[in-house]
Amino acid sequence: MYAIGDKIVYPPYGAGVIENIEEKEVDGQLLTYYALHIPVGNLKILISAAKAPTLGVRPIYAKGEMLGVIQGIMNDPIVMSDNWNQRYKDNMELIKSGNLTDVSLVYRNLMLRERERGLSTAEKKMMTSAKQVILSELMLSQEIDKPEAEIILDETFG
């Protein structure tokens, strides 16, 4: 169980800080929820504490680990289906996993594809979502603001 002040990732929205833990009665049962504030987009989301593990909720990476994870994928091979539907489905699964390496691969692959051939509107939106997840975790793990996180992301994925 997480506590107020913990920094967690809630895929596919990104990283945030638990501002409160609330109890709500639903169908006669008292359920616990995390009130999460995600800085990128200034989102406030309630997450069921009981469902958090199955939703892919996880703690953010530590300051020293975060950059290594996103920089570590740069030499990984690019694996993407040429079939739009399959590529979209595969990328959506990776983003939903909440795994930083997977989300970073989606962002890198879509960014490279956009440079080569362009992206559909749906894939542009997906690339933006992946970027938001990475930026939010980068901001919280490195304790920096969004412009600084964007500079790091641009330098990494250049």
Image (cartoon, grey):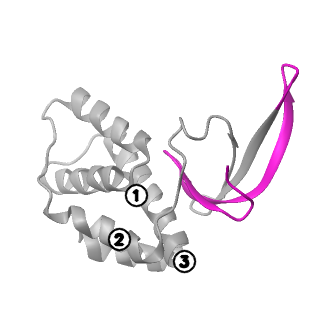
Tell me where residue 70 appears, x and y as whole percent.
31, 65
As rendered, which of 147 and 80 lies closer to the eye?
Answer: 80
Give the image quarter of residue 18.
bottom right
Q: Earlier in the sequence, mark 2 or mark 3?
A: 3
Mark earlier in primary sequence (1, 3): 1
Q: Which residues are magenta?
A: 1-30
Amino acid bearing label 3: Asp
Reading the image, the residue beneath label 2 is: 153
Closer to us: 100 or 134: 100
Q: Secondary structure at mark 2?
A: helix
Estimate the spatial distance between the alpha carbons at disc 1 and disc 3, rounded to whole Å.
15 Å
* Residue at 23 percent of width and 28 percent of height: 86
Disc number at residue 131?
A: 1
Give the structural element (helix, strand or loop) at label 1: helix
Indicate the quadrant containing the C terminus: top left, top right, bottom left or bottom right: bottom left
Q: Residue at x 42, y 60 (%)?
A: 134
The vertical placement of 18 against 48, above or below, is below
The residue wearing badge 3 is: 145
The question of residue 16 being in magenta is answered with yes
